[in-house]
């Protein structure tokens, strides 16, 4: 039981411990009041009241700090508009038609690969898989698209097997093929990425293509190109995609 002589010491300790969590201060005050049989003097009660008010102000300050910090942190500038993707329709790994109508209103990222590629394509697809893992909270407002630049070889069945091998979620990630002419028009004229070589020849070295990822907004406008080999490409794509989903 606390003696009357110990009141000022306990109260001073409670005030001093305002640097600690508010629960610690409240514990001192509750202990002081619980163990007290003799009523507190006016001066002692005033000290308790001041300690409680200080505790309340401290809690409010801590709670308000994240809000104040967010308000003083400037928002990043809007992403530039670099072009518009014309309407297109290709064939997905499930054999169904898939194109700009399915992507309308959604932010999406495109990559360019082919399944028999053993050089840059596996690395590009791994980056896309990392983006998939980081953007599940954006689905269904966000989607991933990988377009084969070897469409005569990469039929839907091969793309489906490739998608399974890389753990692509059908809800979030679509692999596309089609006729050589349609694919070339979509990739080169639409997304403005290089696609060269003769896809009809069996040697993979005869197939060339751009390795950048392309970010497109819900209105079909190109908003960014990202070097797939960049050390921070996943962070940049995830950040910018989230900005488009939330701000446009």
Image: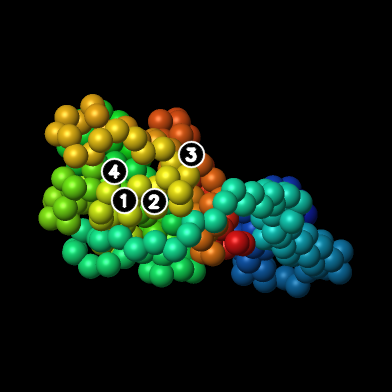
User: Which image quarter holds the N terminus?
Assistant: bottom right
The x, y position of residue 222, in whole percent, is 53, 52
Quarter of the image for residue 123 reads top left
Q: Between 138 and 115, which is closer to the camera in this rendering?
A: 115
Relative side of 232 to 128, left or right = right
Q: Secondary structure at mark 2?
A: helix
Q: Are marks 1 and 3 in contact (CB under 8 Å)?
A: no
Of circles 4 and 1, the one toward us is 1
Q: Are marks 2 and 1 in contact (CB under 8 Å)?
A: yes
Q: Residues within 10 Å of mark 2 (few under 14, many from 20)?
A: some
The answer to which of marks 1 and 3 sits earlier in the sequence is 1
Mark 2–mark 3 Cα distance, whole angstroms, equals 21 Å
Q: Which mark is residue 185?
A: 2
Residue position marked by numbered label 1 in the rendering? 181
From this view, report whether residue 14 is shown above or below residue 232.
below
The residue positioned 25% from the left and 60% from the top of the image is 92
Relative side of 29 to 90, left or right = right
Mark 4–mark 3 Cα distance, whole angstroms, equals 18 Å
Residue position marked by numbered label 4 in the rendering? 149
The residue positioned 29% from the left and 33% from the top of the image is 197
């Amino acid at each position: 039981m606390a003696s009357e002589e110990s009141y000022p010491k306990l109260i001073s300790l409670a005030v001093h411990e305002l640097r600690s969590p508010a629960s610690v201060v409240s514990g001192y005050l509750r202990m002081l009041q619980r163990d007290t049989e003799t009523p507190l003097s006016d001066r002692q009660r005033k000290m308790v009241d001041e300690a409680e008010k200080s505790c309340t102000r401290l809690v409010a300050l801590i709670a308000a700090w994240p809000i104040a910090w967010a308000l003083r942190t400037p928002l990043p500038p809007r992403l530039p508009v670099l072009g518009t993707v014309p309407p297109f329709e290709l064939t997905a790994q499930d054999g169904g038609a898939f194109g700009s109508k399915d992507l309308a209103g959604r932010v999406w990222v495109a990559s360019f690969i082919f399944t028999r590629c053993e050089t840059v394509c596996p690395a590009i697809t791994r980056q896309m898989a990392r983006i998939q893992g980081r953007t599940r909270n954006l689905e269904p407002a966000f989607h991933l698209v990988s377009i084969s630049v070897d469409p005569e070889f990469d039929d839907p069945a091969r793309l489906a097997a490739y998608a399974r091998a890389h753990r692509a979620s059908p809800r979030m990630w679509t692999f596309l093929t089609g006729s050589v002419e349609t694919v070339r028009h979509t990739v080169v004229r639409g997304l403005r990425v290089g696609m060269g070589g003769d896809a009809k020849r069996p040697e993979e070295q005869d197939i060339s293509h751009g390795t950048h990822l392309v970010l497109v907004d819900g209105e079909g406008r190109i908003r960014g190109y990202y070097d797939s080999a960049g050390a921070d490409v996943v962070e940049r794509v995830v950040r910018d995609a989230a900005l488009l989903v939330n701000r446009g």
